[in-house]
Amino acid sequence: MSTTYEHHDYDVLIIGAGGAGLRAAIEAKQRGLKVGIVTKSLLGKAHTVMAEGGMAAAMGNVYPEDNWMVHFRDTMRGGKYLNNYRMAELHAKEAPDRVWELEQWGALFDRTKEGKILQRDFGGHRYARLAHVGDRTGLELIRTLQQKVVSMGIDVFMELKVLKLVHDESGRVAGCVGYWRASGEFVTFAAKAVILATGGAGKSWKFTSNSWEGTGDGHAMALWAGAQLIDMECIQFHPTGMVWPLSVRGLLVTEGVRGDGGVLRNSNGERFMFNYVADMFRAETADSEDEADKWYDDHAAGRRPPELLPRDEVARAINSEVKAGRGSPHGGVFLDIASRRSPEFIRRRLPSMYHQFMELAGVDITSEPMEIGPTCHYIMGGVKVDAETEATLAPGLFAAGEVAGGMHGANRLGGNSLSDLIVFGRRAGMGAADYIESGQAATSLDEGEVEAAVKDALAPFDRSSGENPYDIQRDLQEMMQANVGIIRTQSELEFAAGELDKFTERVKNIAVKGGRAYNPGWNLTTDLPAMITVCKCVTKGATLRKESRGGHTREDFPKADPEFAKFNFAHSSKGGNWDSPIETVESPLLTMPDDLKALLEEDH
Amino acid sequence: MADVTMRIWRGDANGGNFETFTLAQNEGEVVLDVIHRIQATEAPDLACRWNCKAGKCGSCSAEINGKPRLMCMTRMDQLPEGEVTVTPMKTFPIIRDLVTDVSFNYVQAQKVPALLPPPMPERGYVMFQEDVERGQEFRKCIECFMCQDVCHVIRDHEENKEHYSGPRFFIRYAELEMHPLDTNDRRHLLREEMGLGYCNITKCCTEVCPEHIHITDNAIIPLKERVVDAAYDPVAWLGRKIRRKHNRTADEAAVQPAP
Ligand SMILES: Cc1cc2nc3c(=O)[nH]c(=O)nc-3n(C[C@H](O)[C@H](O)[C@H](O)COP(=O)(O)OP(=O)(O)OC[C@H]3O[C@@H](n4cnc5c(N)ncnc54)[C@H](O)[C@@H]3O)c2cc1C
Ligand code: SF4
Ligand code: SF4
Ligand code: FES
C-alpha cells in the first residue's frame, strides 16, 4: 500500500453527500459496516439542498384514489417508456415508506387538515402527490438525513474531491484517490464497496440551475472505471428558469408555482400552452381555461391545465413561442401567479421564490408576472445499474441518485428525484452490504493507478504558461448550449463532436496559477476532464438517437420512432485514460411483464 | 455603468493583505458575481465558497463592508457607493482568502442528542400544522453560520468555543424541545454544557439571519425559561410545580401521546 499519502480504510465508501449518498450511508451503517462519506463541498450544501417543490410518493393523503400503480404509470409515460421499468416500479412502491421514515428522523412536512403529510400538484403527476415544506423541500430532506448521519457517528470527509476510482489487481473497484481542498494534499481510500452518489452534470451548459458541483464527476469516473453510461442524450431543460438579470439567468423557479395556480403567457397575454398539447396527453388535458381553472380545487371537476404537462413538453413550447417572436422583453415568457392568487397565499406557499425575485430581480411576484425561460436542470442519463441492488457493471461499484440512469427514462417528472434518492440510496446501501457479505470484495489498491491520477492532477502546475481553465469552461458551456441544447440537429451535433476533441487537447495545455491550497482554478482544472467526457457521451447519444423523445429533441427527426423505444444507447471506455475512445452500443430495454404493461394502458 | 472597486482580503492562517480589483459593473450583479469575474480573469486562485447562488445553501457567507452577508444575495447596486470591502467571517479560523474553517459548527452538531419519537403508526404520524409550524421556522436554517460569526460570546472570546454551542444550535435545541414527537430532555445539557447562560440577548444573531428566523424571541428566550424550570434549586422546583397547573412543563409538552 502506498505510504506517501494519507490513507483510510472502509467497508463502504460513499462518494457524495446529497440525498442519495446520505441515505445509502444510513443503510450501510445499520448493517453494522464501517462507512465513510466523501463530499467535495461542506456537509449539507449538495444540490439536494436546493430542491424546492417536493418529493413524489403515492401516499394518497390528499387523493385517496392515488396508489403506486398510478405513480408507476405517470413515471413511465413521463419518461416516454425509455425507463428501466423495474426501477420505476420499485420507486413507486417504496417511496411512501421512505417519506414516512423521514418523519421518524425529524422531518416536519406541511400538513393536511387531518394532520397527515400534505401533498401538492406537479407536472405529469395525475394526483397531488408531492410531500413538501413550502418551497424548501430539499433543505428538509438533506438536513434530516444529515442529522441522522451525524447522530449515527458516520465519518464525513468534507471538501475532499475524488479524482479517480482505483481498482485492485483483479479489476474490482477497490477505492479511490482524491485531495483535500483546504491543503491540496492527496488522500487514498480503500473500500470493499464504493457507492457513487455524485449527482448531476448541468454545469457544462451556459444556462443552468446547477452549481459548480454539477460537473458529472461520478458519471465520468464510472465510465473510466469500466461501468456503462446510458441515456446520456436525455437532458432535462426545466421550463422555468429566471432570465433576468443576466447574472441569475438559469436560476430555478419551482414548478410549484404552476402546481399552485401559476400560468404561462406570451407577450400577447395568451395562455399558449393550450396550443401545444401532444396527442399522448390530449385525453387528460383541459381544452379551455375555464375547465383548467376548475381543476385546481377539484381534480374531478375538470382535466389538468396544460401548464402542468411534463417538463419536456412545456420547455419546447416556450422555446417555440420565443422563436415565433412572442417572448418577453428578455427572451423568455411570462409566468403569472400574481393575477390568480392572493399575496398572502403566494407568500405562504412560495416564500423562497418570493424572496428570490424580490432580492435578485427586484420583481414582486405577488403583483407582477415573472419572466422565465428554459434552463439546463437534470440529467436523466447515468450509470447503468441493476434495479434491485444498484450494482454497476464494474464489480464493487454501486450508483444511486442523479448519477444513476434508467429510473426516469427520457424525461423525469418533477418530484421524482428526491424520492428516487431515498428509495435507491437505501437500496444501494443494501446492495453494497450484500456484496461485501458475499465475500467477493476487493483487497488492495493498484498503486500504479493512484500514481497516474496524482501525476495528471499535478501536471498543470508544471507548465509555466498555458490556458486559463476558466476560459475553457466558458467556451465549453457556450458550445454545448449552442449545439447540444434543447433542440438538436445533425450538423450541429457533428460540429460539437469536433469541438469536444479540441477541448480535450486544450485541457492538456492548462497552466494553473497559485498554490495547491484551496485553489478554485486548480479544482476547475480537475473538473474539466469529467465535464468533457460527459459532453462527449451526451453528444454521441444525441447524434445516434435519430428521433425526438423526452429530453432529447431533434429538429431533423421531430417525431418519436417506435424502433428507438426498444433500447438505450450505452457508452463504455476501455483505454483507462480520461481521453480514451468511447464505444457506444444499443442496449435493449428490459421486457416489462404483462401485468405492468396493462397498467400503462389503463385509463385511471 | 461606472466601474466597481473591490477590496478583498487575501491570505491564509499565517496572515494576509487586502488586494484591490477594479472592474466594470454589470446590471443586476451580486457580490458573488463580481468575485466570480475576478476568479475567471485576474485571480483564478481567489478562494471563496458558494453553491446555490440563490440564498438556499448558506455557503457564501462573508463580511461585506464589515457586516456578515450572503455574497450571493447582496446586490452591488444596493451597497453604498465607493469601494466594497470583502473579508472572511472573523469568528472562524482562516483557511484561505474568503474561506474559513467552520468545523466548530459541525462539532457542535455532533453533540445534539437526536430526536426520540414514539414508534410510528402504520401510515405515518398525525401532527397538525400548528404543531409543526414552530419547528418549521427553525428548520428554515441554511447553516450559513453568520449568527455564529456575529455572536460576541465566541467572536471576541475564542476560549468560549469549548463550552458554547451558539445561536445556530440554540435554535436546533429549541426545535427539538418543541417537536411534537420528541421525548428527549436536553435542558440539563443546554445549561451545563452548551452555555445557554452566556447569551445576554443582544439579538445580533437575529439581525443577520438571512432566513429571518426569530432566533432570540422564538428560540433562546423560551429555552432560557425552560432551563430555569429545570433547575435543581428547590424554590424554583416548587415554582415549577405550582405553575404546572396552568402551564404544561417542557417534560409534559414534549411527550405527545402516540396517535
Ligand atoms: C434548483 C434545483 C431544484 C430542484 N428541485 C427539485 C424538486 O423539487 N424535486 C425533486 O425531486 N428534484 C428536484 N431537483 C433535482 C434534485 O434536487 C437532484 O436531482 C438531487 O438532489 C440530486 O441528488 P443526489 O444525491 O444524486 O446528488 P447531489 O445532491 O447533487 O449531491 C452530490 C454530492 O456528490 C458530491 N460529489 C460530486 N462529485 C464529487 C467528487 N468528485 N468528489 C467528492 N464528492 C463529489 C457533492 O459534493 C455532493 O455532496 C432540483 C434540482 C435543482 C438544482
Ligand atoms: S442574542 Fe445571544 S446568541 Fe444571539 S448574538 Fe446575542 S449573545 Fe449571541
Ligand atoms: S439561524 Fe440564520 S444566521 Fe444562523 S446559521 Fe441558520 S440561517 Fe444562518
Ligand atoms: S451560494 Fe448558496 S447561499 Fe449563497
Image (spheres, rainbow, N blue to C red):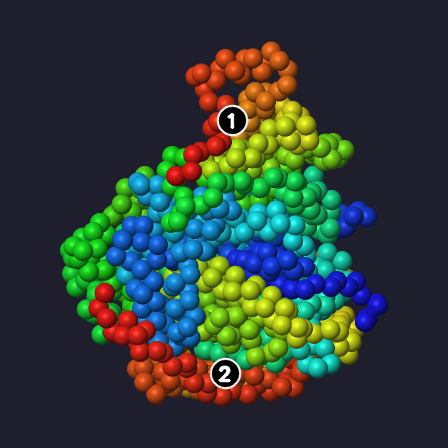
Q: Residue at x 61, y 47 (%)?
A: A151
Q: Residue at x 54, y 51 (%)?
A: A145
Query: Residue A488 appears in which quarter of the rendering?
Result: bottom left
Q: Chain of mark 2?
A: A
Give how far across and how far down residue A114 sits, in percent: 31, 41
The amino acid sitting under disc 2 is Ala
Q: Residue at x 40, y 56 (%)?
A: A96
On the question of residue A134 being in view, the answer is no
Left or right side of A397 for A101: left
Query: For numbered disc 1, what is the local secondary structure?
Result: helix
The amino acid sitting under disc 1 is Ala
Query: For numbered disc 2, what is the local secondary structure?
Result: strand
Callout in the foreground (2, 1): 1
Mark number for residue A570? 2
Disc 2 under 8 Å from ligand 1? The reply is no
Is residue A402 placed above or below A173 in the rendered structure?
A: above
Mark number for residue B250? 1
